[in-house]
Image: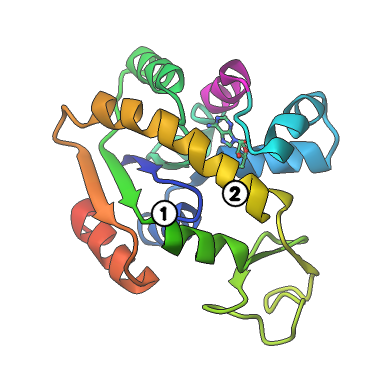
């Protein structure tokens, strides 16, 4: 099963992707996670991507398209995958269709998590991530047991630079510009499924699993 998760920053794409991964045993492919690792490891790609990411803008299409084209042909993707944070532009969506057609397949579901700006800002400003294992927490909705420390591995929790207020506003702006184009690209087919992402994590995941038949 091949799934795309669309939605603005803070809509819960990462959280839902992890739930789907657990249920259907298919990998989560997050271009944001792949890029953050490249920045941390100071690879050539990471050095190129860093300034775009720090400012809340998008990394050039050819960089992320290259990441995805390679990743979806790896052995663990043979039964499908969840794309979290890709595609983000029409060019990326078209490149994905082309790559999938060449591989003889297509996307099965496009889940679009919709949420209002107030919900999103609240979720992002409280989000904390473990530096070691990537586990996510929220100071209000899902705090760690010990302040600043990961429950899973004891690693240090930090706030992503791009979750700070000015960058968040820019990320919303960037998202809005592209979202309509993506919605109209996918909404002509029966696989496009909008979901209300303002609800609790459990309610949203129930709706998503109902759609996927899980
Ligand atoms: P995310 O973790 O999905 O919010 O992504 C963090 C940042 O990585 C974004 O603000 C972009 O700078 C960059 N990024 C992630 N995915 C993409 C993509 N598909 N296209 C362009 N830039 C991306």
Asked if residue 74 lies left or right of residue 39, the reply is: left
Is 180 drawn above or below residue 143 in the view shown? above
Judge whether residue 85 can be spotted in this image: no
Q: Outermost residue toward the right? A: 42
Residue at 76 percent of width and 77 percent of height: 149
Ligand 1 within 8 Å of disc 1? The answer is no
Q: Residues within 10 Å of mark 1 (few under 14, many from 20)?
A: some
Q: Which residues are magenta?
A: 60-70
On screen, 213 above or below 187? below
Mark 2 or 1, closer to the camera? 2
Residue lying furthest bottom: 145
Q: Quadrant of residue 71?
A: top right
Q: CA distance from mark 2 to mark 1?
A: 32 Å
Residue 109: x percent and y percent?
A: 26, 40
Residue at the spot 40% in from the left edge and 46% down from the top edge = 7
Disc 1: which residue: 25
Q: Is residue 63 magenta?
A: yes
In the picture provided, is 133 more to the left or to the right than 100? right
Q: x and y percent of residue 171 in the render?
A: 56, 41
Instruction: Tell me the number on the disc at residue 168.
Output: 2
- Expressed as whole percent of the image width and height from the top left, the position of residue 12 reads 45, 58
Whichever of labels 2 and 1 marks the residue nearer the N terminus, that label is 1
- Secondary structure beneath dot 1 equals loop
182 relative position to 11: left or right:
left
Question: Was residue 23 drawn as part of the magenta stretch in this picture?
Answer: no
């Amino acid at each position: 099963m091949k799934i795309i998760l669309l939605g603005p920053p803070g809509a819960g794409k990462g959280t839902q992707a992890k739930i789907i991964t657990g249920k259907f045993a298919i990998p989560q492919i997050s271009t944001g996670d792949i890029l953050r690792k490249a920045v941390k490891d100071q690879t050539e790609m990471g050095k190129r991507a860093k300034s775009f990411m720090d400012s809340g803008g998008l990394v050039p299409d050819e960089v992320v398209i290259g990441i995805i084209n390679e990743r979806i042909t790896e052995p663990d993707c043979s039964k499908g995958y969840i794309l979290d944070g890709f595609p983000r532009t029409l060019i990326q969506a078209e490149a994905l269709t082309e790559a999938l057609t060449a591989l003889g397949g297509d996307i099965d579901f496009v889940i679009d998590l919709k949420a209002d700006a107030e919900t999103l800002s609240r979720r992002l400003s409280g989000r904390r991530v473990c530096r070691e294992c990537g586990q996510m927490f929220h100071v209000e909705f899902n705090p760690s047991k010990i302040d600043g420390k990961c429950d899973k591995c004891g690693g240090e929790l930090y706030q992503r630079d791009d979750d700070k207020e000015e960058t968040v506003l820019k990320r919303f702006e960037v998202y809005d510009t592209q979202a309509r184009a993506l919605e109209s690209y996918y909404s002509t087919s029966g696989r496009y499924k909008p979901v209300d992402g303002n609800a609790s994590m459990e309610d949203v995941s129930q709706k998503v699993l109902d759609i996927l038949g899980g």
